[in-house]
Amino acid sequence: MLPPFTFANTPRLQLRPLVMQEARELLLVVMASRESLGRYMSWPREMVELDHARRFVKVGREQWLAGRTVRLGVFERESGALVGNVELDGVDSRRRQAELGYWVRSDREGNGYAGEAARSMLRYAFDTLRLHKVRADVAVGNGASARVLEKLGFAREGTLREDRPVGNVFVDHWRYGLLSREFR
């Protein structure tokens, strides 16, 4: 099991694991954002039933207990609304690396929530887990996500050709990396 998520919430956001009672809200958020999220990722197209959202919550908990993933819902503190997700996946304590992922619901894009949530997760990655490097992959063309990473200090390390499918097409992804000493 990974150490507890021990940082304070941001002024605008609360980051915490989703609970099963929030699976319906998760499904509704993903369904409402399917068009924007589905341009760059396959999983939003696959979350079409409540059982799929429940599995997302359940797997997040199981992966946490197994020490592999930290998956957190991102909530607006003022409204309490679920606005996205941030996660640290593939935590490798031997290599001291992991992969950062995040998404924000389409009606909250452009508010800086992805960067704010990602910054908090990076603090946890570097300060609590003592990771050396965090990487992130972004579908080529997803300029908004690339800008989030670049503002956080990530460097583009290369292009992964036809790396993973989005729908029925394999798409290239930019690989980004951030070393602990580069995090500001």
Image (cartoon, rainbow, N blue to C red):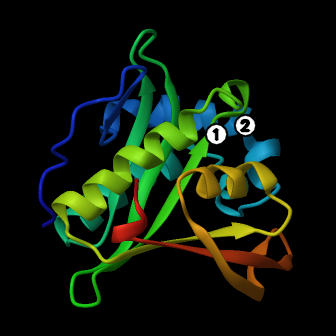
Please give left or right for residue 30 compared with residue 120 in the image. right
The front one of 85 and 18 is 85
In the picture of the structure, the residue carrying the numbered disc 2 is: 33
Q: Is residue 164 left or right of residue 80?
A: right
For label 1, the SS is helix
Mark 1 → mark 2, Cα distance in angstroms: 5 Å
Q: Amino acid at mark 1?
A: Val
Q: Nearer the viewer, residue 135 or 53?
A: 135
Q: Secondary structure at mark 2?
A: loop
Q: Which mark is residue 30?
A: 1
- The picture quadrant where one finds residue 27 is top right
- Residue 71 seen in this snapshot: no
Residue 30's image quarter?
A: top right
Residue at the image point whose x is 48% and y is 19% from the top: 81
Residue type at the position of mark 2: Ser
Q: Position of residue 88 (x, y in %)?
A: 39, 62
Proximity of marks 1 and 2: CB atoms separated by less than 8 Å = yes
Q: Callout 2 environment at 10 Å: few (<14), some (14 to 19), or many (20+)?
A: some
Quarter containing the N terminus: bottom left
Taking the image as drawn, is residue 69 in sight?
yes
Residue at screen point 44% across, 35% down: 74
Q: Position of residue 113 (x, y in %)?
A: 55, 33
Q: Position of residue 132 (x, y in %)?
A: 31, 77
Badge number at residue 39: none
